[in-house]
Image (cartoon, rainbow, N blue to C red):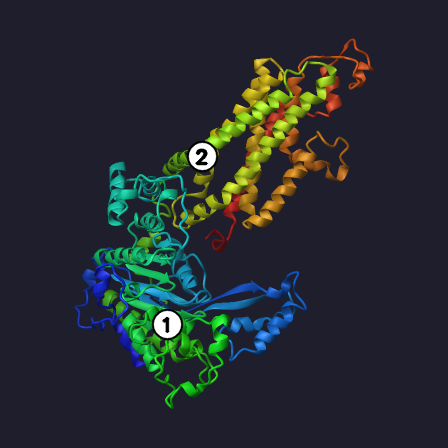
Amino acid sequence: MPPEARRSMSESSVDRPSDLESGGVADAAVPVAPNRDDEKQPSPEEHARRPAGRTLRWTRVVKTVEVKDASAGLLRGSIAAPAAATEQADSPGPSVDSGEQQDEETGGKGKKHAKTILHGVSGSASPGEVLALMGPSGSGKTSILDVLSGRSAYDSGAITLDSELVTERLMKKLKKRVAYVKQSDLFFDHLTVRDQLTYTAFLRLPSAWPKARKVGEVERIIKTLRLGKCAETPIYMISGGEKKRVNIGSELLTDPSIILLDEPTSGLDSTSAVALMRILDSLAREGGKTIITSIHQPSSAVFFGFDKLMLLADGNVVYFGTPQGSLEHVKKLGLECPAGYNAADHHMDLLVQDSAIDEDSLESTSDDFNDNGAMADKSDTGLRQRKVVAGSTTKQRMISSWDADAVAKQIEEDDAEEHARVFGGESTSGGGSLRRRLSRRQSVVMSEKSFNTTWWTQYTTLVHRSMKNSRSAIFTKLNMVKAGAIGLMCGLLWFQMPYTEATVFDRSSYYFFTMTFWVFDAMFMAYMAFPLERAIIFKERSSGAYHLSAYFLAKTTSEAPARLALPAIYMCISYWMSGVNNNFGIFIASTVCSLLSVLAGESIGLFLGAAVLDMEKGMVIMTVSALGLMVVGGFFVRNIPSWILWLGYISPFKYSYNSSVQLVFDKPVPCDGSGLLAACEGGSTGAASTDEVLDFLGVEFSAGVNAALLLALFVVVRVAAFFALKSKKAEERM
């Protein structure tokens, strides 16, 4: 094992630069990290009593994914293929990712091939420390966080918690106790900061806790994360740094032992980033939390504020130790960081390969290096050091120089020694098998319930939250104006129609327009609003916040009144202005049928939103489905081909149109000589019976049966949406 690797692994933290304490940015030299090897180790009794401390270790983690051949689309052939061949021919050395070389082995274009995104990654994180994962885009930072949080599977390797193997069954339980703050801050933006934290507390804290205690926890998080100034502000009005702290606070409410963060400083200025990292450092040291965070390219103050650093490139570990030790490591490789240069920028310059920069830098020869392979003293930065050395780039050189196997063995030895010290028994030296019995501490985790709250508590909390969201999203001034304006326009177009033969089509067209517009509105509003909500639901579900059934039933019962309010306003205006039927009972019954069709349309939108995760594809399917169901609704096409006749029986347009028309034509229609109805025979005397009018309009079933079918369509499709969402794989739900 390299001496620098063993030494850096024994150093668990570095002193903070004075600039970090004052909130500034350090770009100069940093004091050497002290060694803590002489610190007193906790006894087994102290170890067992320690509430928050959890040591997480992982060794030789390998993860592969299947990717589709990039030349499988419409542009394959003469454009894509030569470029790929040229790129392969011009490659300065063998590819690090062996999975990318399997393209030819798949046997043709358009087929999937395996790509390895994590290559034997090993590391550890201890209580009271902040471990940073750093590397260029695509280096595997998010992938290893997904694996450690239990959100993603891996092919081989081992993960241990407090020296005990984390099995697949345990990971399912444990992932709900691990706080995972993803890069995107997903919230219902109309909620205030206090609302967001309070709803999270009521969903995730134990039901046995009184309300006052849960509210007290919310106040503690607001104070800890310094959110007091924006506590009553809607989330869409707060800054990026405050939104990130709200995201972290939502996860801290359950007092997790391990906190994982995916690039928490993205989009923040340097001052906000330093302030956020100081909060994380305080949580680690004062709360005994184990914190692992990925970061792209931090400032010097943030970089040297970490206790440990793991550098990644193409899914490989190129360094694991202290930030200060990373400078010594690259110095031994002849890639020393120039004085006064940001160490994080220097590491990224060595690891990033960009075609816009590398073409010039790769033209340089090995004459710039001395006989020992070190850089000649030209005061160059890492940007100039990315050259070809013995047929390899600096990134490939850093990958090959790091002894990943020795590091993995050292971690396994430390794991075995801790297991023997804490739980007794013989130590397995040399990185022996990690598959041992579960400790009593982990057995407690296995015996815990999947959810801290009861189903009823989840349901009532989600109903309250959903009603507040609906009020903010649906009852807007624009929506109210839309409903009123369209109702007024339709009332003027169909103003006070006489009840005669000539207006039979006008009455039926009024209802078909009403059903078409409001069903389409419900379909597309539900579909367009669901992707963001779906992402939030997947995030909360992965943290074990609530049952999916509680969410779906809460959404159904809370949004129905809000969703039906706008069509009801429209009907109140347009119905009486148009004079469709002056019977108040008919007005109520036809309005109910219209609202049932709106609920059925909303269910269709939710189903497609849950079944098709790709929004572009879903929009195409939604458009085709909605128009197809409309044209078979019985108004536009009377003689529908027999092979597609079945489509009309799953159309909400058909049932709402049939039921409403039957209600309106409740008495014989006087003939007026227009010749529209065959029963009148072109005369202006007499009247056509209601059965003759309904037969002319092609109406099927009774009004009650059509209304019942609308209700059945609403329920069946809504249940189908529930199972479609539930069937999604874990990777898709993240």
Residue 676: x and y in percent read 78, 19
Residue 371: x and y in percent read 38, 91
Q: Is residue 23 above or below residue 643?
A: below
Residue placed under numbered mark 1 in the picture: 347
Mark 2, other Cα within 10 Å: few <14 / some 14–19 / many ≥20: some
Q: Nearer the viewer, residue 29 or 497?
A: 29
- Identified at 62% across, 65% down, the residue is 71
Q: Helix, strand or loop at disc 2?
A: helix
Q: Quadrant of residue 130?
A: bottom left
Q: Tags 1 and 2 in contact by the CB under 8 Å rule?
A: no
Answer with left or right where residue 566 lies relative to residue 666: left
Q: Quadrant of residue 229?
A: top left
Amino acid, disc 1: His
- Identified at 41% across, 74% down, the residue is 383
Residue placed under numbered mark 2 in the picture: 470
Q: Is residue 352 above or below residue 544?
A: below
